[in-house]
Image: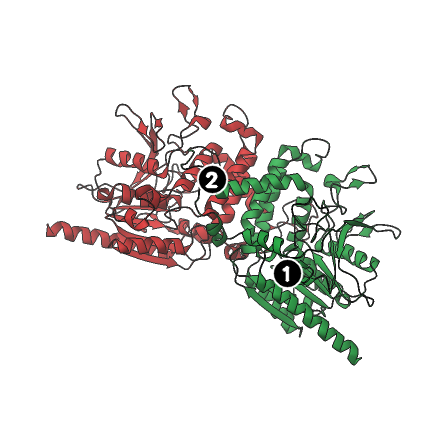
Chain colours: A red, B green
């Protein structure tokens, strides 16, 4: 996507950054999970950009989606060809301005990018957890993030921001720790997965579990279930785009050929793109982590988890100012789902701004360069700071 | 789907039917395919319902979709629990009234339900063709149907009817054999696959080809690639429904449990449904046939194949009266695609009726009981008969 690349080259970056690790040091050095299981010792990989101010009131927590990591912005070394996954939004003068805000991004619990997950070593066996890793929920992920934020000495976050599964974490923060969240920006997300979203995740999981190399999750000493994981990722990529996005990006154009192969080669560009995405993904991601995180997303159900099925009751606990954003062509978390949460927030008398952005890129839109999204986030954070300062002065 | 079952019980059926076989007997007993390859000897499995009239002018050809077969209506034996796949539409007094019309349905070339396909015996090796089966196109399928229709002594079909890939065959008939088609009813279909539709097919194919039992298509002497084919079918079933259909049918209801498993069991009904559909499918369908038919659908491109990319030029060859039907919640072949073909037909001065039916069942809607669809088809065929008789009398 050319917009993305251009923006990277022109924009200013936070520069060189470093991945840090937070180990839950407090005895018993473990966490009680929603499932009832206990998990420990726990580590969260995280990065920070910008400077925490003296009052520790300028912290913005960025929550990543399914396959993301703590590397939201900047570069690890001068040789890096690509910056962090949200470098277009996080940096000096950008939507989330690191000249003003102290930005934190941590890898979610259950992932494979430095935080404790199914490929981490289980201290009881000295082998990777694999299928014995306990299922962590979105709530568990947020609970771990809260410990990290406290460890950094921050009592209240100026904002929590994230899209997709990151957006679920944002919503969970607001309801679980209302006193710790001044504002929240859930993007392209939902309070609970629809049957359609569950269906896509389930088929992706089945593709992984059908791979004989998966071996019920015990594959760390042998070949990995790469073919299954590649198919799973291909399914994901279909849901991240849209009919319109695919039509513009690929249409029926052939890939490197003038005529059909009359065989099962990748004739069309869209086939070639999906195969490429699938093959690239297996180099960096763990199949078990994919299973665990998608299941956590499917389980997420803000209304049910926080008060007997009522979305209004769930949000009645929240105190944050909200900026809710959906995208016209997102059919994974369509606008009607964002509107439902906005209505519930309004019924609770919360300060909510909502915007449906016209975008043809489907669910992926929240990750792509979009001047409307950038200015919305920038303006919203500025207003939150002004209003918070006013309230503080009035006291 | 309860509507379906109720209708089956109440409706009248064509009764006991028999599968017949048409062998291409003319030397050289083979067909030259669009790819340039030759295929033979050829067999088509087919069924007929009703009686061909003396003038042989009441024949209606029904074209089936991806996983269908020649068994469109009736029962093979008294022990059959289910009738043919379109029994709600084909039968005495039904939408396609077998008291009036002689209905023909044949299994498509490349399938595995009695017609020549990849699991048929290759006479050169005395083993199943497997991956050596030549890729047959929608055009090839129609060419084979034409031979069957001629074999039955029919020069002109009163109508050609079909949905999805069956609808592609309908369109192909009208352009390839304009003098042989009096009317045509393409349902829930398109003149060419979108990138999105290709993407879904490609991921389904990848799931099959990722199964180690697939063995490049040479699996007929060993275990079949059932897990891959099951995943492929699950992907298909997602595309046949819709967000709304899934919400009504499953929502977030759990399957046979009150709480989450916190494991990778099928917690949700939608997961259980998909697994069931996948497992059921592998009992009746051949994985290679799935690969070949989906590829034929992806290749289908009426505008490109019939005149340098112009859909209007393609339809300028057609002579049939058309009834085009789309369904509001069909996101595999959305209404805008039907509208584009209707516009092109109108530009060619063709007699076209178009209806978008309000239906929540997604792409599957064309197969389900729908009184609006039934009365549209019934009324259209009645009008065609009246007008054709009038024209004949005027001569």
Residue B115: mark: none
> Residue A348 vs residue B124: left or right?
left
Quarter residue A327 falls in: bottom left
Residue A89 in the image: state x and y as whole percent: 35, 49
Q: Quadrant of the C terminus of chain B?
A: bottom right
The relative height of residue A165 versus residue A370 in the rendered view (above or below) is above
Disc 1 residue crowd, few under 14, some 14–19, many 20+, Cα 10 Å = many
Q: Nearer the viewer, residue A184 or A337?
A: A337
Q: Which mark is residue B255?
A: 2
Write down the residue under mark 1.
Answer: B191
Judging from the image, mark 1 belongs to the subunit labelled: B
Residue A8 position, x and y percent, is: 40, 49
Q: Residues within 10 Å of mark 2 (few under 14, many from 20)?
A: some
Residue A1 in view: no
Name the front one of labels 1 and 2.
2
Q: What is the chain letter for disc 2?
A: B
If you read the primary sequence from the N terminus, does the residue marked by circle 1 or circle 2 appear first? 1
Residue A377 coordinates in the image, percent (x, y):
31, 53
Foreground pick, B16 / A97: B16
Relative horizontal placement of residue A343, taking residue A295 as reference (left or right): left
Residue in view at x 31 percent, y 26 percent: A30
Tag 1, which secondary structure? loop
Q: CB of mark 1 within 8 Å of CB of mark 2?
A: no
Q: Residue furthest left?
A: A395
Q: Examine the image and state in which quarter residue A115 appears.
A: top left
Determine the residue located farthest toward the top in the rendered image: A125
Per the image, label 2 sits on a secondary structure element best described as: loop
Left or right: A41 with respect to A234?
left
């Amino acid at each position: 996507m050319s917009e993305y690349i251009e923006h990277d080259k022109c924009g200013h970056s936070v520069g060189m950054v470093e991945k840090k690790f937070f180990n839950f040091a407090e005895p018993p050095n473990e966490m009680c999970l929603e499932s009832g299981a206990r998990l420990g010792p726990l580590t969260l990989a995280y990065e920070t950009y910008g400077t925490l101010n003296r009052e520790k009131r300028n912290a913005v927590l960025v929550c990543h989606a399914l396959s993301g990591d703590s590397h939201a912005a900047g570069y690890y070394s001068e040789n890096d060809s690509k910056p962090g996954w949200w470098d277009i939004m996080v940096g000096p003068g950008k939507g989330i301005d690191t000249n003003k805000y102290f930005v934190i991004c941590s890898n979610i619990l259950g992932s494979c990018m430095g935080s404790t997950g199914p490929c981490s070593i289980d201290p009881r066996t000295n082998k990777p957890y694999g299928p014995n890793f306990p299922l962590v929920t979105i709530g568990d992920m947020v609970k771990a993030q809260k410990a990290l934020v406290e460890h950094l000495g921050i009592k209240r976050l100026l904002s929590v921001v994230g899209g997709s599964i990151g957006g679920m974490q944002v919503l969970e923060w607001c309801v679980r720790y209302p006193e710790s969240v001044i504002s929240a920006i859930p993007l392209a997300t939902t309070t609970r997965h629809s049957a359609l979203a569950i269906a896509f995740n389930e088929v992706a999981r089945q593709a992984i579990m059908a791979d004989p190399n998966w071996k019920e999750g015990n594959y760390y000493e042998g070949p990995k279930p790469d073919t299954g994981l590649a198919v799973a990722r291909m399914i994901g990529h279909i849901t991240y785009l849209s009919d319109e996005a695919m039509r513009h990006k690929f249409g029926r154009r052939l890939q490197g050929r003038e005529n059909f192969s009359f065989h099962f080669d990748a004739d069309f560009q869209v086939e070639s793109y999906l195969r490429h995405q699938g093959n690239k993904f297996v180099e960096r991601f763990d199949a078990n982590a994919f299973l665990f995180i998608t299941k956590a997303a499917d389980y997420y159900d803000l209304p049910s988890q926080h008060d007997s099925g009522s979305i209004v009751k769930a949000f009645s606990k929240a105190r944050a100012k909200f900026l809710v954003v959906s995208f016209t062509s997102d059919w994974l978390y369509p606008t009607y789902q964002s509107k439902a949460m906005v209505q519930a927030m309004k019924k609770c008398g919360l300060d909510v701004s909502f915007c449906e952005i016209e975008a043809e890129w489907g669910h992926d839109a929240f990750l792509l360069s979009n001047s409307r999204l950038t200015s919305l986030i920038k303006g919203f954070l500025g207003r939150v700071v002004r209003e918070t300062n006013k309230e503080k002065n009035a006291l």
